[in-house]
Image (cartoon, grey):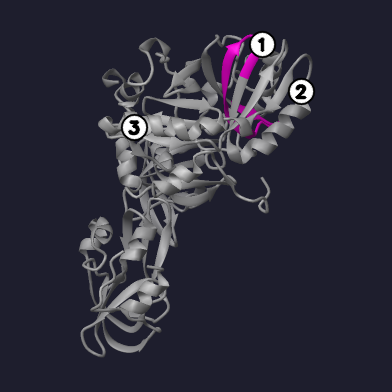
């Protein structure tokens, strides 16, 4: 995305304005950072009830053809050979140096058709990389402008959907999806995924259907206390769940092993970009940790982290989170990962104490679903 | 957005309630708290600190960002509202009750406006 490119509206832009959303530029799009209720209430609605997010800025790249899987296996470090129809899998996408170009979700419709969902800010870079690597019998299409996306998140998300969709058409397993589901008269790909640490769904649809779907979900959600949610609480929710955010916990210079994504890197599998670099680099010298700020202050991205007088790394994300208080994630020397250890964060000139805590900061009670 | 007529306002969205010519209470406006969003952290100066008109004297943090609060007067801090340190959301709840500091020995002040002018500034 170039800085001079005009900001774009999602299919729900008019709805955000009509509902009092506070609009900010984000990844080239005009999106609500919050509505009138504010970040705290929106955050709590997702933890305790249900919230609705516009995530239409996300990019989608369609892979079709006999070599669709082979291309994905080359581009991505997770293993998609075992992915079944109707299932979703997460993966970093690496460069030759083993740094992270982006982190993506892959949806398998069938053996010949896959959808990759990418971060909006990386879309142009991703597509250029993917097309440069393309081989064999595959058609690769950036269909982002033909797809809108809403996220319905929270413990009551399923109950809201059940008022609109027959139970058999609601995906039951986390990271599974059903295509062609009619929700409030709108044809959707209905996916049980999300970026909040709660149960929930993401719905993909044609842009012209966005407003009708938005209204249907809003109306169906009303008896459940559904709250419209902005980017502000999307960030606090994902941070509490310790979900990494591209450009913060990782970028082109950070390896997925350093930032704690090793379980999504199948090093034993040959033939993916970045594998040689990761093998050559050996045991990571940096690690992603969780910090609870025990002194007075809020740690923000880029703030230096010290063990005593020694600079050991920097904050990658941090704020005061509604459910768990002042927390941060940091990328530090791998020698400092033991929960309980005290570190210092430099907050605008003052060194403020913090304690290493296990990640995630927040884990939902899955039995209570 | 509420704007009280008993006090004056700075262009950077602080309110000043003068008790005398040289003593005043200072806070941020309802407009400011609304723009800042849910506040989660406040830093205040200490009693006895010198403050300078047009310079930052406190900072407030919302979930997303840190913002400086500018002092509309020059003088000496005579009291701070310690309750804000533990309960920053008081500012969101009632910006005109949630004062930040009291200043004495005021020697200078920023250009300040009355409620009507401030209402015009904030487009109300």
Q: Residue under circle 3?
A: A219
Chain ID of residue with mark 3: A
Residue A287 vs residue A3: left or right? Answer: left
Q: Is residue A274 magenta?
A: no
Q: Check the image and report above or below for A22 versus A280.
A: below
Residue at (37% x, 13% y) in the render: A166
Q: Residue under circle 1?
A: A112
Say which element carries label 3.
helix
Quadrant position of the N terminus of chain B in the picture = bottom left
Q: Is residue A26 visible?
A: yes
* Residue B34 pos. (x, y %): 35, 59
Query: Can you tell which mark lies on residue A43?
Result: none
Residue A88 vs residue A290: left or right? Answer: right
Whether labels 1 and 2 share one chain: yes
Q: Is residue A267 visible?
A: no
Q: Check the image and report above or below for A91 versus A97.
A: above
Whether labels 1 and 3 share one chain: yes
Q: Mark 1 or 2 closer to N-term?
A: 1
Q: Main secondary structure of the magenta part?
A: strand
Chain ID of residue with mark 1: A
Write down the quadrant of residue B93 in the picture.
Answer: bottom left
Which of label 3 and label 2 is nearer to you?
A: 3
Magenta residue span: A92-114
Q: Check the image and report above or below for A245 versus A346.
A: above
Query: Can you tell which mark lies on residue A134?
Result: 2
Which of label 1 and label 3 is nearer to you?
A: 3
Residue A32 vs residue B103: left or right? Answer: right
**How many dots with numbers?**
3
Say which element carries label 2.
loop
């Amino acid at each position: 995305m170039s800085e001079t490119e005009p900001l774009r509206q999602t299919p729900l832009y008019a709805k955000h304005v009509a509902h009092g959303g506070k609009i900010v530029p984000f990844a080239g799009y005009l999106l609500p950072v919050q509505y009138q209720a504010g970040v705290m209430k929106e955050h709590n609605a997702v933890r305790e009830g249900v919230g609705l997010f516009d995530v239409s800025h996300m990019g989608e790249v369609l892979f079709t053809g006999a070599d669709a899987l082979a291309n994905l296996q080359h581009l991505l470090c997770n293993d998609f050979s075992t992915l079944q129809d109707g299932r979703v899998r997460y993966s970093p996408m690496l460069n030759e140096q083993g740094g992270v170009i982006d982190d993506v979700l892959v949806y398998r419709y069938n053996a010949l058709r896959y959808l990759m969902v990418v971060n909006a800010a990386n879309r142009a870079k991703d597509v250029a990389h993917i097309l440069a690597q393309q081989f064999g019998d595959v058609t690769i299409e950036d269909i982002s402008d033909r797809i809108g996306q809403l996220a319905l998140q929270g413990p009551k998300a399923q109950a809201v959907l059940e008022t609109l969709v027959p139970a058999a058409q609601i995906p039951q397993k986390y990271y599974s999806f059903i295509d062609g589901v009619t929700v409030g008269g709108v044809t959707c790909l209905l996916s049980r995924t999300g970026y909040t640490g709660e149960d929930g769904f993401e719905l993909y649809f044609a842009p012209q259907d966005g407003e009708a779907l938005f209204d249907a979900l809003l109306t169906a959600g009303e008896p459940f206390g559904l709250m419209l949610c902005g980017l502000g609480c999307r960030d606090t929710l994902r941070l509490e769940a310790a979900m990494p955010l591209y450009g913060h916990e990782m970028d082109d210079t950070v390896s997925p092993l350093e930032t704690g994504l090793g379980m999504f890197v199948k090093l034993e599998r040959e033939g993916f970009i970045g594998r040689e670099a990761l093998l050559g680099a050996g045991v990571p010298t940096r690690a992603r940790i969780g910090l609870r700020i025990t002194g007075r202050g809020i740690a923000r991205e880029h703030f230096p982290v010290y063990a005593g007088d020694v600079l050991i790394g920097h904050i990658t994300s941090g704020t005061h989170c509604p459910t768990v208080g002042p927390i941060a994630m940091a990328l530090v020397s791998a020698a400092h990962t033991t929960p309980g250890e005290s570190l210092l964060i430099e907050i605008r000139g003052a060194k403020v104490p913090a304690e290493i805590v296990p990640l995630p900061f927040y884990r939902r009670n899955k039995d209570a679903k | 957005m509420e704007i009280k007529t008993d006090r004056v306002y700075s262009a950077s969205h602080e309110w000043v309630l003068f008790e005398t010519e040289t003593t005043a209470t200072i806070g941020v406006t309802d407009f400011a708290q609304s723009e800042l969003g849910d506040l989660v952290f406040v830093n205040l100066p200490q009693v006895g600190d010198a403050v300078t008109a047009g310079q930052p004297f406190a900072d407030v943090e919302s979930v997303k960002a840190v913002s400086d609060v500018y002092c509309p007067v020059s003088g000496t801090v005579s009291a701070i509202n310690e309750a804000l340190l533990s309960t920053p959301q008081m500012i969101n709840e009632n910006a005109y009750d949630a004062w930040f500091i009291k200043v004495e020995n005021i020697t200078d002040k920023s250009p300040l406006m009355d409620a009507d002018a401030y209402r015009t500034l904030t487009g109300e």
